[in-house]
Image (spheres, coloured by chain):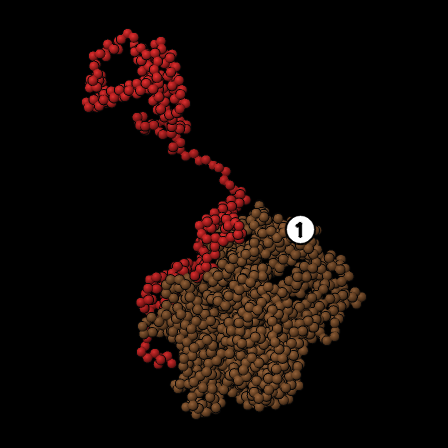
């Protein structure tokens, strides 16, 4: 145990450097192991009479040792699993060593050789700590009707409602300001986007991006957009005044016109009726009283129309 | 309509045969119009007409009808093929080879061309020869049936096709077609007698696609499928005798709405607009009720149809039992501003149904009666609907318009033969007349008045006056003499002094009757004096030489006694009398408070009197007058008075609105001494902003329309404020920007599109000229930071419009105007490209007009030949007639150069181009042609454009002309020529001042009397003349031999075309009256205010002089004339004896108002 200081020094320096390189505890552990192996190899070399060694050769030897030990472990694991166990026994190791062509009988003698160096066990590197779950307050004890072997209550914060208040913005000015700037921002962003993605016009020849105007686009039926309220306005209107009758159905139907709208069951009328049952329904209702020439059925052609006319 | 109505109508017709001396040698009784094919793709129409006529003379061998554009295939009379000649001289007014480029020459040629086809002179483009086989038949005066097959291919006028270029069938595309045109334009789409005085019954048939509806006049008798079931035929019968000019048609895939209140009324609109239609027409029944009640007369037709169509020629066109409206009048319940405007249009068109459609007129000079009566009952409706304030305000507005117009361009004659008068004044003066009629007429008498309407469907000026005196027992002759016989308005200058010793108000009233457009007024004049003891009316007699009028005061001045002061309306108010003169009991004085005289009053009284008047006078007109006057008194007291008015909730909102603008002006005049925040700011804050945070406007709530209008207007007026550097104060701009920023319409029941548009207008108003350093090019870098903010808003608004369009794109319109303002003030590089893209076909018409206005302005400011060409090209090729017309109109109003100006734009090519435009390019549209002439006049004046090389022998021309004219060998020409010749001096003289009308017209009279065979023609002849300012001549450039064919017989008579000029003016006035306009809008549409071309002035003034001629002769040659007239009159009168006393007298007697022979 005389070398404790040295190895400890090596170990600690290893950990330090390891901690420097990486904060990951698993990496840390890995480095510490490798360092131990290096110590082992060095001591074996010293034992063998070397005074110094190149780093590369030490590394190579370390690598070989590591592989060898790994192979032993892997093989031992296989053997133990072969016998349906989870933990390897001595015999597993022995079999492994035998399998790998190692003369097991020489081992006790080797272990007891006189000039061997004793290496202290590597320091227990701090195990990677899993961060503790956030605890807020005391877990509640089980109420009497729950047997004690039942799991504990989870942390209170997971089920206890703790209402938190932020003073609501009640200042009218701020609200209006906010609403206004929000709307403005939305509008700006939207129009800029539209301007970016489509054709634009500009008031300045040298700069087309500062005040981009979405290019004027002619409509085929300009009066429709100009006269019909936009959907937004329609919505608004419904909100503000629900008494407005809803006529949307027929505005949607471009081809619809009710020139022949009556019960005179012509083919075309039937389709009109189908297209817009609500409207036709109301019209049919009115028709009982209304006698308007435009609502009368269209007559079938007569062979001698003239006579009937004059 | 009860079936018996047909009876009086027929009787009437018979009566007409005898009583109304028709210019035609036949009487039309019935006409069939059948259009059996309409092709929307090719924009063509095929059909036939059949006219039933009774010859009135034995040797009738030629029948003349009106027809333009139509291709006539075949004419048959009583099933016999008839030869015909089709000649339309108005296609090309002056022949091409002519190098004449002066307007005198043109208008002369035009008048000749028009009268050559004037139905009121018995002429027409289509001359049909009666087959010899029928001569005997004709001699027995037996019925003739003229059957004409015709087609129309791509009509440029008369019928307008709207065919949107989208996928689908014509019905799905919303394609439609409708008849349109200015005044009598029916001849553009079928052969007819295109006169307002030739009435007949109608049978109308239209075969259209099964998915379409044909709307026309009269009752829809039935709808029948064609044999292949793909088309339908609409059969209409119009049993009330109607003039061809009142026949109309609209075909399209209309949505049908039967009026829920009146099932005989049907509304039509284009697909998808039904909800708007429902809302828009929901009010119409009230107008019906109102008119029927006020006239104690049922609506004359058995049905009524309203059709709302796109690309309308005019906003409102009234035809027999149907009216055609612009689809842009439709609106939803969320729209505030358009609602009263649309209702006015509806009411106006309905008024014209009674007077104008049902009752037609006898001649062009009687037009004012119909326009006047319909305008008057429309005014009554306004009074009832919008209130007395609105009504009086409207009258005042109209009055101001007429005054401004007449003073600018000279007087307008109402009735050129009978008298003169103003076009527009009828609105103002008319109420006076008709009011008398109505208020004095008992129920019984109005019943009679009504019966007239039934029995005599043509009205003439004389008949109208006679009926007034019959019904009311009042003699309105002086009124007529003053206003109808003469043109011009009265200009009063008033001032006063208070004579303390006598306790008398010495009022001095001067008149200016020498400047153009004015006349001398003699007669009573009402003056209202508000004294401490009350308000007193005095009627002064304005006479030739009396300038001073002493008016005794009722109250002694007293200052210490605190007593309430009684006002005119009986109200008693407390006043702070500290401002007034201690010696005088006078608070304020008003001249002609009832606006019964067509006048402009400039009255001088002290500023405190105006302030009292503003605060305490209850008449809105007085308030408005005082606001106008206070502009000249920028004092703290005026400021206070205006602010008080602004705040007063009970005050009429229009007064408050004009107070805003006045306050802005006063503030600007007082800029150095002004204390406190900018004018109106604190007021606005108090009224419309949040109590807690005064910089934030309340969320919109437009439930109170008065406040809404005020809220809209105040920022616009505020933006006119200027600081000492003549810039808009930063505070104001920030304020407006904040208004825009915090505008929140989410909780509002109404749309805020007009409000937002006005905010943009306010921004535009705040713009002042850029400080420019050596004309540097405008770039973004040197953009003024304030302008940058403005531009930011405009950009955002304009872009948002693309995503969420506002109603009628009001915001786009305002943005375009604002951009032009920025360009003009040098903040943004002047560039028409943006406007040109918005002016393209396919944009909403309001946008197009706004954009075109900017291009017109650019053309003027930058003198751009390219843009002028672009505009001219659009005038010729744009698919929408209204836009074409508007461009001409705007160019005339804001001309790129005028006749006295040097301009690089003025060159020979342009002259030729414009000449061609008016000569032949606009033959399909009377209105457009007049517009082109107006523009030509504005640019080049009456005489030869200065940029043209001098013509050789220019002077010889006239001399030669005279000679040629006087040549007695060609009689008709002699008449025309001599008249023209005699008129020459006067019309030239009137360039200086048209007071010199008495030229040597004796000969004219004689020739006239000898050649013209009946008084009707005589009159229309005169009428016609007024359309011809002067004459250099036709014959010089027209081979004499060809002339008779162009101008057959006597070129007398008057037709829609010549009259278009005056009529057109009327159109404007109507337009102006039809629309309620806020002061701001007024300034934006100056069209309504000063619509008339100066050329019109020429023509009207020459008309005026002409008229004077006439008068002159009439007095001088009274005997002769009477003798002449007598012959004709005699038989008419005898036949009329059995008529009830209240009927309009027959047209014949109507003519001879000045003659005592009437009583014979």
Task: Please provide percent x and percent y for residue B223.
Answer: 37, 73
**The residue positioned farthest toward the front in the image shown:** B952
Is B740 on the left or on the right of B135, as rendered?
right
- Which quadrant is home to the N terminus of chain B? bottom left
**Residue A113 in view here:** yes
Out of B123 and A250, give the one closest to the viewer.
Answer: B123
Above or below, B379 relative to B785:
below
Above or below, B358 relative to B771:
below
The residue sitting at 51% across, 66% down in the picture is B873
**The residue positioned farthest toward the right in the image shown:** B501
Task: Please provide percent x and percent y for residue B1145.
Answer: 56, 83
Out of B625 and B735, give the one closest to the viewer.
Answer: B735
**What color is chain A drawn in?**
red
Q: For numbered disc 1, what is the local secondary structure?
A: loop
Dividing the picture into quadrants, the one containing residue B994 is bottom right
The residue sitting at 54% across, 44% down in the picture is A173
Q: Identify the subunit bearing mark 1.
A: B
Is B612 on the left or on the right of B65, as rendered?
right
Dividing the picture into quadrants, the one containing residue B404 is bottom right
The residue sitting at 53% across, 45% down in the picture is A177
Dividing the picture into quadrants, the one containing residue B413 is bottom right
Task: Please provide percent x and percent y for residue B951.
Answer: 60, 74
The residue sitting at 31% across, 26% down in the picture is A148
Out of A299 and B1088, give the one closest to the viewer.
Answer: B1088
**What color is chain B drawn in?**
brown
Out of B172 and B421, give the one closest to the viewer.
Answer: B172
Residue wearing tag 1: B725
């Amino acid at each position: 145990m005389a070398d404790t200081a040295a190895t400890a020094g090596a170990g600690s320096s290893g950990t330090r450097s390891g901690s420097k390189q990486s904060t990951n505890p698993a990496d840390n552990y890995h480095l510490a192991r490798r360092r131990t192996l290096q110590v082992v190899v060095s001591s074996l070399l010293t034992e063998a009479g070397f005074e110094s060694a190149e780093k590369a050769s030490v590394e190579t030897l370390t690598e070989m040792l590591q592989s060898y030990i790994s192979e032993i472990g892997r093989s031992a694991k296989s053997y133990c699993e072969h016998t349906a166990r989870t933990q390897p026994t001595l015999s597993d190791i022995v079999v492994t060593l035998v399998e790998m062509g190692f003369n097991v009988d020489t081992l006790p003698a080797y272990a007891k050789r006189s000039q061997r160096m004793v290496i202290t066990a590597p320091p227990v590197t701090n195990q990677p700590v899993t961060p503790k779950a956030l605890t807020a307050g005391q877990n509640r004890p089980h109420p009497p009707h729950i047997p004690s072997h039942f799991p504990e209550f989870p942390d209170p914060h997971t089920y206890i409602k703790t209402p938190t208040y932020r003073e609501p913005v009640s200042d009218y000015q701020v609200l209006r300001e906010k609403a206004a700037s929000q709307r403005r921002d939305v509008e700006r962003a939207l129009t800029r986007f539209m301007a970016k993605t489509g054709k634009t016009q500009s008031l300045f020849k040298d700069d087309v991006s500062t005040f981009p105007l979405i290019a004027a686009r002619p409509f085929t039926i300009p009066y429709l957009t100009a006269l019909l309220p936009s959907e937004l306005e329609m919505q608004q209107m419904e909100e503000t005044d629900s008494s407005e009758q809803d006529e949307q159905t027929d505005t949607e139907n471009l081809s619809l016109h009710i020139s022949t709208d009556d019960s005179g069951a012509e083919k075309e009328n039937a389709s009109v009726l189908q297209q817009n049952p609500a409207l036709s329904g109301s019209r049919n209702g009115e028709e009982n009283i209304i006698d308007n020439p435009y609502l009368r059925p269209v007559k079938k052609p007569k062979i001698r129309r003239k006579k009937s006319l004059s | 309509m009860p079936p018996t109505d047909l009876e009086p109508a027929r009787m009437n017709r018979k009566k007409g045969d005898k009583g109304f001396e028709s210019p035609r040698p036949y009487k039309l009784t019935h006409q069939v119009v059948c259009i059996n094919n309409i092709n929307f793709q090719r924009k063509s129409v095929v059909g036939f007409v059949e006219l039933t006529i009774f010859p009135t003379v034995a040797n009738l061998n030629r029948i003349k009808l009106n027809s333009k554009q139509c291709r006539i295939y075949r004419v048959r009379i009583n099933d016999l093929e008839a030869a015909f000649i089709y000649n339309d001289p108005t296609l090309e007014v002056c022949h091409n080879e002519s190098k004449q480029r002066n307007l005198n020459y043109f208008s002369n040629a035009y008048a000749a061309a028009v009268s050559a086809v004037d139905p009121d002179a018995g002429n027409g483009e289509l001359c049909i020869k009666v087959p010899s086989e029928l001569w005997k038949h004709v001699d027995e005066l037996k019925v003739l049936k003229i059957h004409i097959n015709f087609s129309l291919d791509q009509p440029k006028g008369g019928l307008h096709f709207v065919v949107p270029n989208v996928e689908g069938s014509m019905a799905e595309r919303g394609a439609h077609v409708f008849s349109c045109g200015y005044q009598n334009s029916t001849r553009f789409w079928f052969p007819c007698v295109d006169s307002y005085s030739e009435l007949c019954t109608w049978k109308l048939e239209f075969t259209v696609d099964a998915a379409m509806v044909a709307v026309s006049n009269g009752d829809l008798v039935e709808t029948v499928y064609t044999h292949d079931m793909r088309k339908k035929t609409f059969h209409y019968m119009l049993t009330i005798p109607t003039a061809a000019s009142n026949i109309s048609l609209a075909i399209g895939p209309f949505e049908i709405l039967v009026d829920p209140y009146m099932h005989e009324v049907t509304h039509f609109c284009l697909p998808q607009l039904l909800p708007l239609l429902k809302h828009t027409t929901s009010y119409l029944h009230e107008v019906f009720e109102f008119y029927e009640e006020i006239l104690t007369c049922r609506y004359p037709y058995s049905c009524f149809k309203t059709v709302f169509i796109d690309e309308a020629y005019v906003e409102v066109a009234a035809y027999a039992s149907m009216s055609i409206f612009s689809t842009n009048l439709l609106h939803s319940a969320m729209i505030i501003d358009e609602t009263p405007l649309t209702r006015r249009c509806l009411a106006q068109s309905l008024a014209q149904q009674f007077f104008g459609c049902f009752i037609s007129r006898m001649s062009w000079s009687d037009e004012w009666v119909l326009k006047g009566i319909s305008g008057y009952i429309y005014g009554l409706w306004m009074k009832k609907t919008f209130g007395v304030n609105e009504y009086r305000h409207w009258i005042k507005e109209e009055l101001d318009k007429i005054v401004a117009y007449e003073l600018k361009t000279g007087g307008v004659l109402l009735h050129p033969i009978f008298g003169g008068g103003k076009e527009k004044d009828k609105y103002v003066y008319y109420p006076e007349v008709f009011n008398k009629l109505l208020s004095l007429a008992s129920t019984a008498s109005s019943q009679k008045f009504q019966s007239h309407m039934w029995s005599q469907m043509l009205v003439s000026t004389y008949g109208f006056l006679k009926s007034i005196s019959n019904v009311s027992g009042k003699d309105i002759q002086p009124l007529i003499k003053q206003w109808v016989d003469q043109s011009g308005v009265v200009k009063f200058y008033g001032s006063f002094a208070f004579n303390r010793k006598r306790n008398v108000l010495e009022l001095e009233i001067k008149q200016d009757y020498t400047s153009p457009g004015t006349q001398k007024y003699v007669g009573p004049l009402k003056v209202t004096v508000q004294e401490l003891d009350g308000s007193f009316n005095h009627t002064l007699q304005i006479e030739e030489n009396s300038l001073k009028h002493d008016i005794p005061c009722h109250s002694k001045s007293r200052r210490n006694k605190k007593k309430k002061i009684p006002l005119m309306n009986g109200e008693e108010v407390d006043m702070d009398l500290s401002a007034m003169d201690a010696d005088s009991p006078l608070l304020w004085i008003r001249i002609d408070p009832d606006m019964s005289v067509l006048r402009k009053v400039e009255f001088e009284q002290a500023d405190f009197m105006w302030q009292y008047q503003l605060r305490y006078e209850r008449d809105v007109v007085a308030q408005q007058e005082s606001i106008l006057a206070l502009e000249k008194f920028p004092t703290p007291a005026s400021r206070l008075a205006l602010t008080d008015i602004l705040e007063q909730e009970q005050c009429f909102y229009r007064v408050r609105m004009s107070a805003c603008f006045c306050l802005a002006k006063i503030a600007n005049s007082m800029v150095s001494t002004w204390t406190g925040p900018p004018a109106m700011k604190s007021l606005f804050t108090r009224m419309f902003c949040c109590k807690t945070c005064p910089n934030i406007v309340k969320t919109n709530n437009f439930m109170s329309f008065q406040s809404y209008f005020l809220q809209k207007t105040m920022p616009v007026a505020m933006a006119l404020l200027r600081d000492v550097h003549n810039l808009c104060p930063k505070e104001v701009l920030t304020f407006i920007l904040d208004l825009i920023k915090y505008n929140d319409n989410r909780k509002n029941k109404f749309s805020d599109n007009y409000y937002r548009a006005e905010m943009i207008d306010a921004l535009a108003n705040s713009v002042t000229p850029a400080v420019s350093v050596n004309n540097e090019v405008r770039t973004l870098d040197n953009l003024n930071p304030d302008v940058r903010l403005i531009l930011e808003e405009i950009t955002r608004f304009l872009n948002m419009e693309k995503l969420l369009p506002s109603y009628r794109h009001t915001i786009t319109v305002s943005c375009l105007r604002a951009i032009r303002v920025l360009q003009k003030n040098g903040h943004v590089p002047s560039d028409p490209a943006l406007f040109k893209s918005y002016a393209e076909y396919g944009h909403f018409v309001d946008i197009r007009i706004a954009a075109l206005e900017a291009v017109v302005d650019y053309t003027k400011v930058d003198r751009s030949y390219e843009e002028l060409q672009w505009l001219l090209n659009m005038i010729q090729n744009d698919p929408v007639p209204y836009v074409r017309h508007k461009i001409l109109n705007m160019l005339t109003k804001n001309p790129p150069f005028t006749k006295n100006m040097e301009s690089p734009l003025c060159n020979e090519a342009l002259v030729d181009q414009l000449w061609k435009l008016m000569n032949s390019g606009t033959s399909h549209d009377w209105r457009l042609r007049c517009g082109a002439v107006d523009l030509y006049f504005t640019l080049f004046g009456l005489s030869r454009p200065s940029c043209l090389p001098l013509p050789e022998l220019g002077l010889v021309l006239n001399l030669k002309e005279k000679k040629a004219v006087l040549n007695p060998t060609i009689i008709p020409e002699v008449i025309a020529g001599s008249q023209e010749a005699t008129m020459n001096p006067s019309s030239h003289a009137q360039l200086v001042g048209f007071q010199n009308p008495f030229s040597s017209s004796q000969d004219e009279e004689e020739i006239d009397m000898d050649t013209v065979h009946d008084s009707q023609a005589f009159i229309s002849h005169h009428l016609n003349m007024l359309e011809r300012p002067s004459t250099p001549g036709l014959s010089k450039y027209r081979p004499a031999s060809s002339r008779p064919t162009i101008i057959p017989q006597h070129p007398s008579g008057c037709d829609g075309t010549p009259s278009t000029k005056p009529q057109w003016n009327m159109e404007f006035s109507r337009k102006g009256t039809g629309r309620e306009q806020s002061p701001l809008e007024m300034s934006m549409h100056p069209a309504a205010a000063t619509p008339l071309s100066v050329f019109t002035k020429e023509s009207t003034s020459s008309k005026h002089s002409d008229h004077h001629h006439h008068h002159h002769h009439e007095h001088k040659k009274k005997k002769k004339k009477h003798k002449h007239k007598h012959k004709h009159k005699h038989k008419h009168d005898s036949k009329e004896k059995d008529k009830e006393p209240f009927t309009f007298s027959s047209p014949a007697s109507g003519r001879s108002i000045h003659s005592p022979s009437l009583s014979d």
